[in-house]
Amino acid sequence: MNIRLIAAAAALAAFSGAAQAEGASKGESLFNANCAACHGAQAAGTDKGPPLVHRIYEPNHHGDMAFLLAVRNGARAHHWPFGDMPPVEGVADADVALIVTYVRGLQREAGIY
Ligand code: HEC
């Protein structure tokens, strides 16, 4: 694990409280611009990618670091038949943190954790 990822993980961990509400709305825009084409509006899934509002992606199974790694490196198809996720260009670590805040909010609303 490199230093940049450790720093990003610390930033994710430090992200809380009041910043969370604001983060969720910025996270929604970032999600819609960069992820929704495959993961769907409200992360509900499409025919190109799985829903992230799903038990598979709860924090104990796919921690916040898994999101960072998926965006940086892409993800090999292993849970679903959609094919590989390619790396997503142009999304900064701080943007991923906002996207994670948004997705965790949706997961909590859906009663996933
Ligand atoms: C081109 C389509 C596509 C885009 C765009 C995309 N994804 Fe994915 N993503 C996928 C697919 C397909 C999988 C499922 C791989 C599998 O079978 O497990 C996936 C899996 C994931 C996973 C789980 C990774 C793992 O470790 O299993 C996360 C987290 C994720 N995506 C987050 C994101 C985020 C955040 C964005 C936007 C910044 C994004 N994805 C954009 C297609 C996409």
Image (spheres, helix red, strand yellow):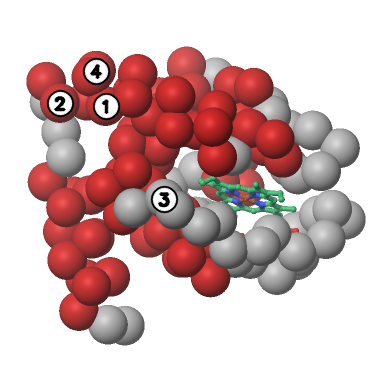
**Of circles 2 and 3, which is in front?**
3
Residue 100 image point, x, y percent: 39, 40
Reply above or below: 50 against 36. Answer: below
Evaluate if marks 4 and 1 touch, with contact meaning CB atoms under 8 Å apart: yes
Q: Which residue is mark 4?
A: 21
Evaluate if marks 4 and 2 touch, with contact meaning CB atoms under 8 Å apart: yes
Q: Quadrant of the N terminus?
A: bottom left
Please report the residue visible at 59 percent of the width from the left and 21 percent of the height from the top. Answer: 42
The answer to whether one can see residue 63 in this image is no
Q: Quadrant of residue 47?
A: top right
Reply above or below: 23 against 79. Answer: above
- Counting residues from the N terminus, which is met first, the one under dot 2 or under dot 3? 2
Please report the residue visible at 44 percent of the width from the left and 24 percent of the height from the top. Answer: 28
Q: Amino acid at mark 2?
A: Ala
Q: Looking at this rendering, what residue extends furthest in the front direction?
A: 90
How far, Cα to Cα, is label 3 from label 4? 20 Å
Q: Which residue is mark 3?
A: 91
Element type at mark 2: helix
Element type at mark 1: helix
Instruction: Kindly identify which numbered label has been placed on residue 23.
Output: 1
Q: Amino acid at mark 3?
A: Val
Q: Quadrant of the C terminus?
A: top left
Evaluate if marks 3 and 1 touch, with contact meaning CB atoms under 8 Å apart: no
Residue 34 image point, x, y percent: 55, 40
Instruction: Kindly identify which numbered label has been placed on residue 19.
Output: 2
